[in-house]
Image: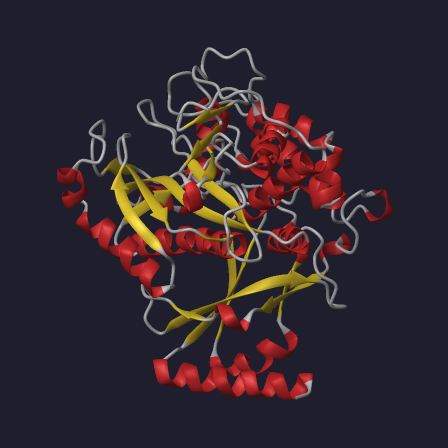
Amino acid sequence: MSQSDAMDAAQRQLESWANAHGVRWLRVVWIDLHGHARSKWLTPVSWARVWRDGVSMVSTLSLKDAADRTAWPVFAGERSAMPEGLLGAQNLLAVPRPESLRLLPWAPGHAWVMADLQHPDGQPLAFDARQVLLKASTDLAQRGWAMRVGLELEFHVYRVVCDGSRMSPRQAAWPAEAPEVEMLHPGYQLLSDAYADSNHEVMEIAAEVAAGLGLPLSSMEVEMGPSQFEAVFDAMDALAAADAMVAFRVALREALARQGYHVTFMCRPPFDTIMSSGWHLHHSLVDAHGQNAFAPLSAQPHLSDLGQSWLAGLLRHASCLAAWGVPTTSGYARFAPNALAPQAAVWGVDNRGAMLRVVGQGAATRIENRVHEPAANPYLVMAAHIAAGLDGVDQGLRAPPACESPYASAAERLPADLNTALDALDQSQVMRAQMGGVVVDHYVHIKRAEAAQCNQADDRRAWEAKTYFSRL
């Protein structure tokens, strides 16, 4: 079958599927550098063109900071050092991936299809985050391994207080003021069944959107902090796990917003009394036979030789992993002693104070990285894990002994702020070689601009509320 015939067949299949399910709107969705979902909503008139031509959109959408300000001088001509092919706010194409077509359980008559970004000549956008992970996973597969990932994602849910004042044109600002909210539970009663029951609507909606999108949600939990929750997912291949994480964040926010809730994946909401949210990334490697390559032999403690070298690579590149995994200016305050969050680049055996927690036995042996905040871009984080882990394997690194007192350790401290983490990433030849220099340069440039805005703000907390709490 020719490519043209395949496109025609896909179009006929789409139309038949859409008619059978009463689809009125097809949302073509792509994920930007910050994990935001961007989309164009297509009526049936446009469906005939979508598989063949993709969807055109302005390239500045790929150049924005978290407040939606274009962080590169797109009209500076030859004086600009911005990524190639994007001067003058040229067009990019969002090219749908038909296998991602899904009905939206919270929006009757709507479906979405996820898209990859490319230039009009068909070349992929160099810093399209999903393509970065796809390349890293392909490199890993060529060595005979695949990365399996389990997700534990903490977040906050609030009820919006609808006083209407912030939507007045007189209150317009860039970025907009954060919504007024109230808590759903007072916190400090971990895994409270009473709090979970009183928030059954949140739990039910989360389960409904996950099931409707085919996401392997394993559990929902009431977390320790006020109005804080956690979602846990079964293990998946890395690319599927990253797709699942962005889909769940988008779906949960949109579905709950229709019921008057505000969901934020910001690590530290801008209130006096909160508990930080983390994203705990459990992962292992499996070989071509599906066997866990981290599982130790009888004479090996905790991890195989491969797992030991992989873990040592993660420790060596801890500051770079923080740069990818903690993309906000507020997230670094989470690295505090005795807070069930890491403070230093150490590992431990089933120790939740360590950066890397080795847990499980046999086929369930895995490494949990506790550095990340839930607003991070999972494609970039997982690709960086592959880069760091493979460096440890290639260099034959061995991890130091497990740490039993992670907050008393004299080991290297994790970065204290975003700029310090970005310095480490900018100087990392391993990250540049494995993830691409243009990817590192682009990410560092945009995040430095973001950090500068925060540092220059008269009220840092207010800036973070508008930039992160409202949007992430």
Front residue of 444 and 24: 444
210 left or right, relative to 354: left
Residue 72 visible within the image: no
Front residue of 284 and 297: 297
Is 149 drawn above or below residue 406 in the view shown? below
The quadrant where residue 429 appears: top right
Image quarter (top left, top right, bottom left or bottom right) of the C terminus: top left
Q: Residue furthest front?
A: 299
- Which residue occupies 37% across, 21% down? 339
Tell me the colour scheme of the image: secondary structure
Number of numbered tags placed on the structure image: 0
Image coordinates of residue 113 in percent, x first then y, are 49, 68
Is 466 drawn above or below residue 234 in the view shown? above
Residue 189 visible within the image: yes
The quadrant where residue 19 appears: bottom left
118 left or right, relative to 372: right
- Which residue occupies 32% across, 71% down? 108
The quadrant where residue 434 appears: top right
216 left or right, relative to 87: left
- Which residue occupies 22% across, 39% down? 184
Image coordinates of residue 314 in percent, x first then y, are 59, 32
150 left or right, relative to 226: right
Image quarter (top left, top right, bottom left or bottom right) of the N terminus: bottom right
Image coordinates of residue 322 in percent, x first then y, are 56, 31
